[in-house]
Image (cartoon, rainbow, N blue to C red):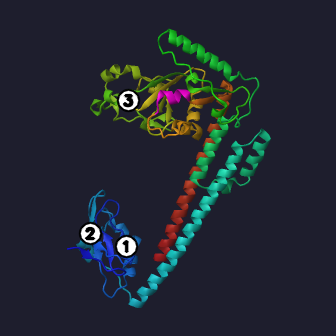
Amino acid sequence: MPHLLNVTKDLVWNSTGTGTVGRINIITDVDDKTFVADSHVTVIRPLKVDSRFIWCYIAAPGIQKRIEPDDEKSLVSGTTNQVELNSSAVITLEVPIPPLAEQNRIVARVDELMSLCDQLEQQTEDSIAAHQTLVETLLGTLTQSQNAEELAQNWNRISDHFDTLFTTEHSIDQLKQTILQLAVMGKLVPQDPNDEPASVLLEKIVAEKERLIKEGKIKKQKPLPEITEEEKPFELPEGWEWCRFASLSNEIATGPFGSMIHKRDYIKAGVPLINPSHMINSKIVEDESVTISSEKAHELRSYELFDGDIVMARRGEMGRCALVTKRESGWLCGTGSFILRFHHDLSREFVLLLFRTDWIRSYLGGKSIGATMTNLNHGILNKMPILLPPINEQNRIIGRVDQLTAICDQLKTSLAEIQKNQIDLTNALIDQAVG
């Protein structure tokens, strides 16, 4: 028979359910509705005791930590994935009961302090939102600067308040992304008029592709339309060029289909397969459990990776890339990936930098075609507008980005240490107050 609940008096303590065991709530009067308890909760009906006081006691960390199965005084049975709060544990739980008048004073004080906490939380959220807006606005002035003088002025405005602006992981990530955007706009390092223009590199790429086509190593690509002014998000410096990605790359090869490789093909200490999950921070981090035999690798030799290739995810996180080095040469491209190959003069690090920008990732994610992409295809990638600086400037940009990114990483490390110290201090003060 259903267990009818008394509003404002009964408490329900979740006894089963993934991630919800231990939650306790007081039944409150909502539109005079009738409440019925199901089998997933334990009903507590206090007698001559304030229900709110019982709620405060059970909701406190001292009892809640006993919901973990590995706690020394655990109240639950089962494993971490499936725990159960038995009614016998609830019945035998010792509860300190002060006089009723003191219970009421405790509950009133808790309500008062909880209200204060809610106000502080709201103020914090408002402060964080205002801080994020300020950071976005100030960083936006950098990318919108019309010339070097204006850029310097805007940067000085930020540097004067650096310590108060970049105090969260989000703000530091915004700074990183702004650095990347300035890099691809040609605003991060000065131009050198003596640099060989990017148009010369494009001519070299065309010549090499024609040679590879004649040798039967790659297929001839279909001609693509010129880039329109509407497709150019910003103006490039002298010596830079806009082009389609197909004009920049020698080849875009697709990894094997899922039907060609099965889990039963995996062995230990074999030839590694590189899937999108193995592309971490532009580097390849292999999984020893995802390797295949030499015989299977020979069967899939057309998907072999070589030093200087870039592997890129075509599913999931669009733009996720990693560089193939000598160490990974001879390994195989896995499913869900592209192999990108380029002229030897083109900086692979600069290509990786391009794919880290929000601008490129937005394109690859489908913003350019007004839809969310879940599986990137050759057509979208080949038509992608891309920018190309002179070769020497590519290298200067990479050096500067590496330098500034290292500073951002140091900021994050310092921030993590500060936050840990704050938590340790808070816990120590709480322990002192409770003790």
Q: Quadrant of the N terminus?
A: bottom left
Q: Camera-side residue: 244 or 140?
A: 244
Closest to the camera, between mark 1 and mark 3, is 1
Amino acid identity at mark 3: Pro
Q: Earlier in the sequence, mark 2 or mark 1?
A: 1
Q: Camera-side residue: 274 or 229?
A: 229
Tell me where residue 388 sits by quadrant.
top right
> In the rendered view, would you say 348 is above or below 217?
below
Q: Where is residue 303 in the image (x, y as percent from the top left)?
A: 40, 23
Amino acid identity at mark 2: Asp
Tell me where residue 314 sits by quadrant.
top left
User: Quick check: 98 left or right of 247?
Assistant: left
Q: Earlier in the sequence, mark 1 or mark 3?
A: 1
Determine which residue is flagged by label 2: 38
Determine which residue is flagged by label 1: 25
Count of residue discs: 3
Residue bounds of the magenta highlight? 376-383
- The residue at the far right in this view is 149
> In the rendered view, would you say 104 is above or below 16?
below
Determine which residue is flagged by label 3: 272
Q: Residue visible at 75% across and 27% down?
A: 192
Secondary structure, magenta segment, majority class: helix
Tell me where residue 208 sits by quadrant.
top right
Q: Residue visible at 35% across and 85% down?
A: 97
